[in-house]
Image (tube, rainbow, N blue to C red):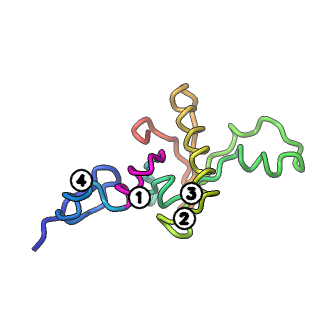
Amino acid sequence: MKAELTCEKCRQTIVQATAKYTRGLCIRCYRLAKTGRKTIQLECKGCCRKYILGVDAVVTTPEETISKVGAWLGGGPTAGLYPDVVGPAERPGHLNDEQIAKDQEAIRVVQEAMKSGTSRKWRCFKCGRVQEYSADTL
């Protein structure tokens, strides 16, 4: 029987032979590390669903929504009033270039907010629980 280990990045169970080839990462995290894209790992405290932004999950920020419909709604600085919505990708691990660019921008915004000490929240798509991004997600 093959020994099982845990991916150092996403904590997914992997086979020892895979871990040896991928330097302790699952195939998905290994491929992502090779691309150099940023990720944020989240786990919902309500339903325990795990998301990795930029890999198997997508995020919709209030800034993005306001930029699309802001003129129609009257615009204004309302981005801090609403949480980001985090949900599963349609095809995990196979995000298109447009979605990758959008997620990388959202990750940058979240990381900048965390570094500046600004409180920022996200909503789990599955259970709807709103929670703050924590420092360990960076």
The residues tagged by marks 4 and 3 sit, at their Cα atoms, a distance apart of 25 Å
Look at the image and say whether residue 33 sits in the magenta stretch: yes
Q: Quadrant of residue 6?
A: bottom left
| Residue at figure coordinates x 57%, y 58% from the top left | 128
Query: Is residue 97 found left or right of 135 in the rendered image?
Result: right
135 to the left or right of 24: right
Categorize mark 3 by other alpha carbons within 10 Å: few (<14), some (14-19), many (20+): many
Question: Does residue 4 lie above or below 59 as drawn?
Answer: below
Please state the extent of the stretch shown in magenta in the rendering: 28-38
Horizontal and vertical percent position of residue 32: 42, 54
In depth, the one of 2 and 34 nearer the eye is: 34
Mark 3 secondary-structure assignment: strand
Q: CA distance from mark 1 to mark 4?
A: 23 Å
Amino acid carrying label 3: it is Val
The residue located at (58%, 29%) in the rendering is: 118
Q: Which residue position is annotated with label 2? A: 89
Q: Which residue is mark 1?
A: 48
Q: Earlier in the sequence, mark 4 or mark 2?
A: 4
Could you say which is closer to the camera, residue 66 or residue 20? 20
Residue at image location 64% in from the left, 52% down from the top? 60
Which is in the foreground here, disc 2 or disc 1? Answer: 2
Q: Give the percent coordinates (x, y) of residue 103.
A: 58, 50
The label on residue 24 is: 4
How far apart are the alpha carbons under marks 3 and 2? 6 Å
As helix, strand or loop, the secondary structure at mark 2 comes to loop
Nearest to N terminus: mark 3 or mark 1: 1
Label 3, on which residue?
58
Q: Amino acid at mark 4?
A: Gly
- Is disc 4 placed on a helix, strand or loop? loop
Please provide percent x and percent y for residue 85.
61, 53
